[in-house]
Image (cartoon, rainbow, N blue to C red):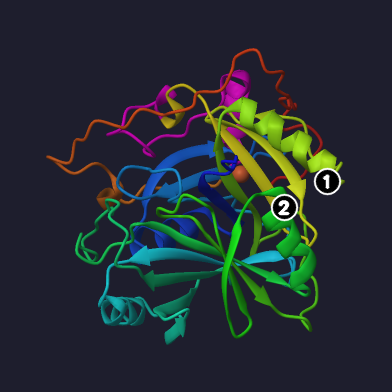
Amino acid sequence: MSTLVKGLHHITLCPEGAQADIEFFTRVMGQRLVKQTVLMDGSIPIYHFYYGNADADVGSITTSFPYSCTRGRPGSGQVSATSYAIPPDTLSFWAAHFDRFGIEHSGKQERFGAPYIRVRHPAGLLLEVVEDPEDGRRPWTTREIGADVGTRGFFAAVLSVRDVCEQESFLVDALGLRKVGVDGQYHRFEIPGGGPASTIDLHHEPERRGGSWGFGSGTVHHLALNLETDEALLQQKALYEELGFTDASELKDRYYFHSMYVRSPGGILIECTSNVPDGFYQDETFEELGTKLHLPPWYEAQRDAIVAMLEPITVPEENRPKPGSTNVPRAVSGAGSSHTPLSRTSPRFGEGRHQV
Ligand SMILES: [Fe+2]
C-alpha cells in the first residue's frame, strides 16, 4: 500500500520580532522570503512569513509567526530542531559563516554518520545544517552564501519526546513511516519513496520537561506533512479515527494549501496538507514572491486594521529577485477538490484584543 504522506511540507515556529526573524532567516540561513501573509486563526494580527529555497519547493518551507506577545516554553513534545540539507564538505563554511554573524552554534556534530552543526535563532529556536550528498534541489543565494554551499531544503525534522514507543507507533501506524535506525538517543524514520525532505528523527529525552503547546515565542508550533490532495487528507483523518486519534481537526482553508491537524502522542502537533491550484502563485508571480504583504481574500476588507497592528518590516534588498534569475515555477500537483467542505475563521481585527 502506498503511503498517504509524501514528504515534509513545512515547519512552523514562533520567533519574537518580525524584522529580526527576517534578518536571521534570509542573511544567516540564506533562505528566500517566499511569502508574507498573516496567521489565519484568532483575532490578533500576527505575520506569517514563509522562507524556502530558490524554487519555494514543498519540503523547504520554514514558516514563522513572530509572536512577541507571549513567550513559549521550549521542551519535550515539540519539534526541537529544523534541519536543512547542505552539500558535502561545506560544514566549515557554515561554521565560519555563523561566527561572522556572531550566532551561537554547536560546532561539528555527527548523527547517523552525517556531519552537522546546530545553530540558535535569536529567539532561542534551534536549526541545523546537515551534509547530504544526495540533495539536488536549487538553493537560494545571497551575498555571503553561494550556490555551492547554500541550503537545498529540509533534511529532517527533529522531534523531542520523553517516550519513544507511542510516538513511534504513531509515525509507523498512522503516518506510514518506516523506522530505519537508532543512533544513541536518536531514532530515525523515513517516509517511504525516499527523496529529499523525508526524514523524521525522534530525540529521546526522557528527563526533559514538556514544552508549551500554544503559540509562544521560542518554540516550534507544528510540523506539516505533504499529502497532496484533499482526498488524501480525508483518508488520513479516517485512519486517525480508526486508530483512536479522534481529535483530528476539520479541513481548514489556509488559502495556499488546505490543512488538517492532530496532536500526536508525544505532544507534537502534526499538520497534513493538500495542494491547491497555483499554490503560492495565486497572488504573486515567481519573481515577486515574498516582496509584499498578501492577505487571504476573506481578510482583505480589514487590511488597514491588520496592517496598523503589525510591526513595519523591510525586505532585505538581496532577498528580492536577482537579474537573470527568472525561472518558470513548477506546476503544483495534486490540486485539492473544490467540493470538500473547508473551514475558515472570520475574525474582527482591532477590537478588544491587545496589540502585539
Ligand atoms: Fe502549518
Among all residues in the image, which is located at the extreme front?
A: 1
> Label 1 sits on what residue type?
Leu
Q: Going from the N terminus, do you reach mark 1 or mark 2 first?
A: 2
Magenta stretch holds residue 284 = yes
Is 101 drawn above or below residue 261 in the view shown? below
Q: Quadrant of residue 39?
A: top right
What is the quadrant of residue 285 in the picture? top left
Q: Looking at the image, is 105 positioned above or below residue 196? A: below
Residue 215 on image: x %, y %: 72, 54
Give the residue drawn at x 80%, y 77%.
209
Cβ atoms under marks 1 and 2 closer than 8 Å: yes
Mark 2 is on which residue type? Asp
- For the record, the magenta segment spans 281-310
On the image, the x and y values in percent for residue 246 come to 87, 41
Q: Is residue 313 visible?
A: no
Element type at mark 1: helix
Q: Which residue is mark 1?
A: 243
Task: Name the element at disc 2.
Answer: helix
Q: Residues within 10 Å of mark 1 (few under 14, many from 20)?
A: few
